[in-house]
Amino acid sequence: MRISISEINQLISQEMLGDGSLISVLEEIQQRYRYLPREALILASERLDVPLSQAYAVATFYNAFSLKPKGKHCLQVCMGTACHVRGSPQVLNRIETTLGIAAGETTPDMLFTLETVNCLGACALGPIVVTDGEYSGQMTVQKSDMLLKRIMRTEEVKKDG
């Protein structure tokens, strides 16, 4: 995905210029590009008159921000204790095998990013997989197969339609 300076300037609206707007600006950039490109961080720090080191500090402190491109669909597999004992390692292994990537990676077509998280706070529903913010509880290997097939089918329809 190509980075557009004029588009980033548009994302940084006049209302955002001022104290305390760095996080809001980074959220806008992250939403548009699915990560924070270096060029965008530089431009944001210049426009907001904050040191680049501060922009990087914020971008690396919050888990919601990423300095690496992410796929269109983000899958998070909970590896907390309750999910782990209920089978999340097997679910993770199946998703890794199906997508051909390891946790922390993105598919070459930029469709999927696979992440692990330590706990999602919904232990009674474990194992849990969060897909684009949507929680799926009592996940099994078979359910993970169905989840991925549903997403891939939806993407095929979008591509063909």
Image (cartoon, rainbow, N blue to C red):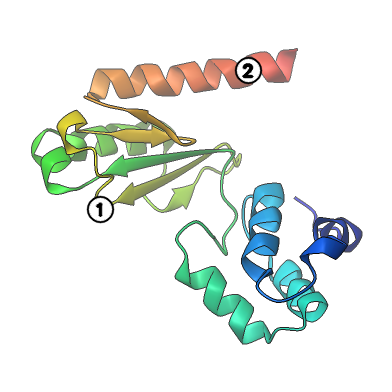
> Residue 152: x percent and y percent?
53, 21
54 or 99: nearer the viewer: 54
Q: Relative to 124, is 43 on the left or the right?
A: right
Q: Is residue 8 above or below residue 143?
A: below
Q: Residue at x 45, y 60 (%)?
A: 63
**What is the x, y in percent for residue 86?**
11, 33
Secondary element at tag 1:
loop
Mark 2 residue crowding within 10 angstroms, few (<14) / some (14–19) / many (20+): few
Q: Which of marks 2 and 1 is in front?
A: 1
Q: Residue 48 versus residue 140: which sits nearer the camera?
A: 48
Distance Cα–Cα, label 2 vs label 1:
32 Å
**Amino acid marked by disc 1:** Asn
The kind of residue tagged 2 is Glu
Residue occupying image coordinates x 63% and y 17%: 156
User: Can the viewer see residue 97 in this picture?
Assistant: yes
- Circles 2, 1 touching at the beta carbon (< 8 Å): no
Residue sitting at x 66%, y 49%: 31
Marking on residue 156:
2
Figure quadrant of the C terminus:
top right
Q: Which of marks 2 and 1 is nearer the N terminus?
A: 1
Q: In which quarter of the image is residue 120?
A: top left
Which residue is disc 1 drawn over? 118
Residue 102 in view: no
User: Could you say where residue 92 lies in the image, as x and y percent from the top left?
Assistant: 27, 38
| Residue at 55% from the left image edge and 69% from the top image edge | 59
Tag 2's secondary structure? helix
Q: Where is residue 143 shown, x and y percent of the image?
A: 29, 19
